[in-house]
Amino acid sequence: MKKVLLFAIVAALAFGMNLYAATSVTIKLDRPKVDVTKMGGKDRPKSGRPSVETKNSTSNYEGKISCSGLAKGETATITLEAYFITRTLGRSKNYDVVEKREEVGKFTFGGEEDKPTQEFAFSSPQITETETSELKGGRRNRHVVKSKSGKKLLGVIVRAIGPDKKILKVVTEPNNPAWIKLAKEPVVRVE
């Protein structure tokens, strides 16, 4: 009797288990290719006239997402999200924030036309950084002081979400275990 009851409990648990319990998701994210445009900054700073250089950059990412472990005939649609982490420059204390969240795409695995590995690509928002060079001091101790303002892109968090909102996989570029831990929460906040 105990064996039958145990079997019934195991069968009920197995039947009621989430589709994604045995599913394995892998994300491979390449290092970004960065497009940079610069303006200004060609002139040397003079007394009362600083030299200002503005740099606009966009990071372009490519990668692959794989899914395995689905039962025959089952399908899974996985949403891929990207979170861009920036730091504001020119402050006495640095603050890292999620600049933007972007849905990279929805990827369906399983079924008759199963593609266990699929490619993706996405780009960061344009990030602007300004460097100002000023000439300071008198004739004998003249020196150039540089300061930065704007923002700097620190990296990106990419996570795979199942239809039940379960977080299936998290990767970061560059690799950052603290970000991975934060991205396993329902809402991504970097503080």
Image (spheres, helix red, strand yellow):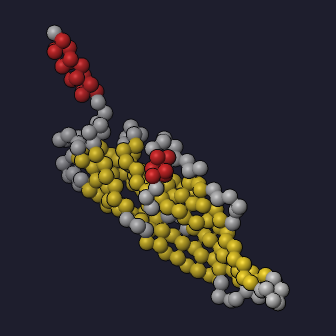
How many labels, in total?
A: 0
Image-quadrant location for residue 151: bottom right
Can you say which quadrant of the picture contains the N terminus?
Answer: top left
**Residue 49 falls left or right of residue 130:** right
Please give the name of the residue rendered at 52% of the width and 76% of the height, measured from the top-left corner. 36
Is there any visible trace of residue 72 in the rendered image?
A: yes
Please give the name of the residue rendered at 18% of the width and 48% of the height, measured from the top-left corner. 112
Is there any visible trace of residue 102 in the rendered image?
A: no
Q: Position of residue 23 (x, y in %)?
A: 27, 42
Q: Position of residue 185 (x, y in %)?
A: 48, 42
135 in relation to 113, above or below: below
**Residue 19 falls left or right of residue 152:** left
Q: Position of residue 165 (x, y in %)?
A: 41, 40
Q: Position of residue 67 (x, y in %)?
A: 27, 49
Image-quadrant location for residue 133: bottom right
Q: In this rendered view, identify the residue nearer to me: 142 or 122.
A: 142
Identity of the residue furthest to the front in this view:
140
Q: In this rendered view, identify the residue nearer to me: 143 or 111.
A: 143
1 in relation to 67, above or below: above
Please give the name of the residue rendered at 62% of the width and 71% of the height, measured from the top-left corner. 129
35 in relation to 97, above or below: below
**Residue 30 falls left or right of residue 72:** right
Please give the name of the residue rendered at 29% of the width and 58% of the height, measured from the top-left corner. 118
Identity of the residue furthest to the top in this view:
1
